[in-house]
Amino acid sequence: MNIDGLQQITFEVHEKVALVTLNRPDQMNTWTPVMSRDLSDAMYECDENDDIRAVIVTGAGRAFCAGADLSGGEEGFTDRVEIQRPPMWPYQVRKPVIAAINGAAVGVGITYSMLADIRLATANAKIGFAMVRRGILPELASHVTVSQVAGFSRAADLLMTGRIISGQEAADMGLISEAVDANTLLDRAMEIAQDIAVNTAPVSVAVTKALMWQNLGANIPKLMEAEGKFINWLGQTTDVKVGVQAFLNKETPQWQMSPTKDVPDDLADLLKRPAG
């Protein structure tokens, strides 16, 4: 089965299981606007095609997705391409979506995975919400998905430090379902997907998924909109330049901005502390 126009992912269907593979292995599958559009098109196909009963998303080569493509500098956080319809995310697909994290999942590599239903990873995969170390912030509603899955305290640890953890540590935290050996990751993901494809009723699964995501999913578009406003602003600031250049040059960043002085008035209301 082919989807016209895919450039940076591959799409295959095996026995009613769609295998979606991020396919920029020489760049560690770093995220681009084209990849984002390709993934959305693949999710539409998975949602609309009744011959597909489950979905696996994985990466080619040694990484799942090592974050935004910063080869052109900080613009990698804010670049866009024209799309014909609203993005389709894994949580919206009426089939279970399994993220098989085969290596580094950093930044958007892990925030995208948090929108899947089930996450598996290799035990030594490097996982991190590294955005705050680049002068940007986590996106794709990870401010709520990580708390929902791992609890507030662990979410605060991961999102506010941006530190890297292993797949095994992620499993111990409950951030992912299982940490497995690299040689068995895809087999394990396929085992789960084929069990769903063969032994579960498609409507029952679709309704179950919708109910599980109902309350959480209702807040995701609004949160993505708020995150987007901050990302678009931060992407033009001094600190994102500092963070990206420090990362590229392997230096300690010298941050320059102040949360009390530099946040514009039209965004400051979103940062107001709760009363009391």
Image (spheres, helix red, strand yellow):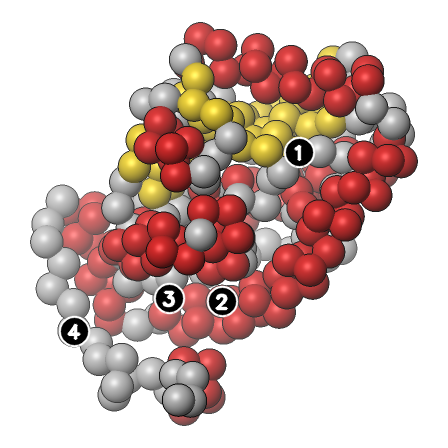
Instruction: Give the number of the mark in front: 1 or 3.
Output: 1
Q: Residue at x 44, y 8 (%)?
A: 183
Instruction: Give the distance between the C-alpha atoms of the residues marked 3 and 4, in whole angstroms.
Output: 14 Å
Q: Mark 3: which secondary structure?
A: loop
Residue 256 marker: 4
Residue that mark 3 sits on? 235
Instruction: Give the distance between the C-alpha atoms of the residues marked 2 and 1, in whole angstroms.
Output: 24 Å
Residue type highlighted by circle 3:
Gly
Instruction: Give the number of the mark in front: 2 or 4.
Output: 2
Residue that mark 1 sits on? 97
The answer to which quarter of the image holds residue 29 is: top left
Residue that mark 2 sits on? 227
Residue type highlighted by circle 2:
Glu
Q: Earlier in the sequence, mark 2 or mark 1?
A: 1
Query: Badge 2, how many Cα within 10 Å: few under 14, some, many 20+?
Result: some
Quarter of the C terminus within the rendering = bottom left
* Residue 79 seen in the figure: no
Residue reaching furthest to the top? 183
The answer to which quarter of the image holds residue 104 is: top left
Q: Earlier in the sequence, mark 2 or mark 4?
A: 2
